Every structure is written in C-alpha cells, then in structure tokens.
C-alpha cells in the first residue's frame, strides 16, 4: 500500500512569506508526527497528533509554527513570517499508535524548505 | 540532559567488513531504542529496535545491543554491502512518552 506522502517535495520562499506543508499519512494511522531535520542532524520533534488533536506541541520553536489535522488524517504544518533559519527538511511520520508502545513509525520523504 | 550522543559521525569500511555504531544516553527512564537508516533524499526507515528488558536483538546481518547500566546501545552490521551505505540514526524514548530523541547520525560508507 501507499506510504506516507508529503507535498511539496521542495519549497523555495522568501523571508517573511507564509508556507504550508502537507502530510498524507498511511491510511488508518491515528498517530502523526512532524519533525524538522537540519543538515547533518537527526530529526527534531515538533508536534504529535493522536487523531485530530495535538497531543503534544512542545517541540514547536515559536508561535510562527502551527499544525492542524482537522479530520484525523491529512495534516498541514504552517509557518508564518518565514526566516532563513527555518530552512530545513520537514519530515512527517505516522504510526498505528504511540511509538513507545511498540508501533513502528513510518516516515515520509520530507519537504525541503529553503528560505531566501 | 536528555540528548543522545552518537559515534562515529563518519564510518568508512570495505565490503564484507563489520560496522559498529555506538550511542550513549543519560535519561535512565529511557526504555525504547530504535535505529533508523536514511538514504539520500528519503525519510528515515526503522531497521531494528530494542526494549530495555532485552540485552540483545538480531535480525539477519543487523544486531543491536543494550547496556542499561552503562546507558549505551550499539548497532552492529556484519558482512557489509555497498547498499548498506546510508546515514544511520539511533534514538531513545522515555517510558510513557512518545517523543523520540535522535542522535546526530553516522554516515556509513561501504566501499566495494
């Protein structure tokens, strides 16, 4: 079956602009995670959804970042007033349940965001 | 802190050799330790994991060992092949949590 998909695969924007990044999880997966990966680093947790609600958004760096998952499936990560430091690969992952309970987390290919 | 230290950052081996990547952590409440392989342009893929009640787990050419007392765990790849070339990440999750903390990654290069 289809894996986790993310669109766009690449996004170039100018400083100060607004961007939306989309994640389509594996069908039926209730848990959805967003991560940010800078060059030469491991993924850094941003936010975790269980169903429609954000169970933990403690990784969001500031209030310019926001994510939604209105129907418990597709999720959108929104970044306002982008800064050059926001440039990174944004990864989405989904699982049938919380990873700590043994559920495998499946990652998408990521969206490469470049803020000029 | 709750960081995961991963070493080495780069590992170059000849095809057929073994490769070992080590990670250390400080949070004694950690109880789940996955390893991921990330190829260029792709997201990380889980290759093996281990829970804190087990000391070793093996899956064909890949094995993971865990020393809870010393707070370190290692990935072992035997009979390496060129297709094993990728970046490998260790991670840990605290019991009751769902937020993984990743190491900085090891770039493994297997020369044919």
Image (cartoon, coloured by chain):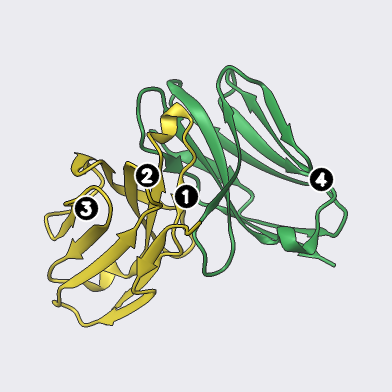
Chain colours: A yellow, B green
Q: Are marks 1 and 2 in contact (CB under 8 Å)?
A: yes
Q: Which residue is mark 4?
A: B78
Quarter in which the C terminus of chain A is drawn: bottom left
User: Which mark, residue A29?
Assistant: 2
Name the foreground residue: B26 vs B58.
B58
**Within 10 Å of the Cα at label 3, are there few (<14), some (14-19), or many (20+) other Cα atoms?**
few
**Within 10 Å of the Cα at label 1, are there few (<14), some (14-19), or many (20+) other Cα atoms?**
many
Specify whether B59 is left or right of A100: right
CA–CA distance in space, label 1 to label 3: 23 Å
| Earlier sequence position, callout 2 versus callout 3 | 2
Q: Residue at x 32, y 60 (%)?
A: A23
User: Which mark, residue A76?
Assistant: none
Q: Residue at x 63, y 26 (%)?
A: B66
Q: How many marks?
A: 4
User: Residue B100's x, y, as percent?
Assistant: 41, 39
Res A99 → quadrant? top left
**Within 10 Å of the Cα at label 4, are there few (<14), some (14-19), or many (20+) other Cα atoms?**
some
């Amino acid at each position: 079956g289809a894996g986790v998909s993310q669109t766009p695969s690449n996004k170039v924007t100018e400083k100060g602009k607004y961007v939306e990044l989309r994640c389509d999880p594996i069908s039926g997966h209730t848990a959805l995670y967003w991560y940010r990966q800078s060059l030469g680093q491991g993924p850094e947790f941003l936010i975790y959804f269980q169903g429609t609600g954000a169970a933990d958004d403690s990784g969001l760096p500031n209030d310019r970042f926001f994510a939604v998952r209105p129907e418990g499936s597709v999720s959108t990560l929104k970044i306002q007033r982008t800064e050059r430091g926001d440039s990174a690969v944004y990864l989405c992952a989904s699982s049938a349940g919380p990873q700590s309970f043994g559920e495998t987390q499946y990652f998408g290919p990521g969206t490469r965001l470049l803020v000029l | 802190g709750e960081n995961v230290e991963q070493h080495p950052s780069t590992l170059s081996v000849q095809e057929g050799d073994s490769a070992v990547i080590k990670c250390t952590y400080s949070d004694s409440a950690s109880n789940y330790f996955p390893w991921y392989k990330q190829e260029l342009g792709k997201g990380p893929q889980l290759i093996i994991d281990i829970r804190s009640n087990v000391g070793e787990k093996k899956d064909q050419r890949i094995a993971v060992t865990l020393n809870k007392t010393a707070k370190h765990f290692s990935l072992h790849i035997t009979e390496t092949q060129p297709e094993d070339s990728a970046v490998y990440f260790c991670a840990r999750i605290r019991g009751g949590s769902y937020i993984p903390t990743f190491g900085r990654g090891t770039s493994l290069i297997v020369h044919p």
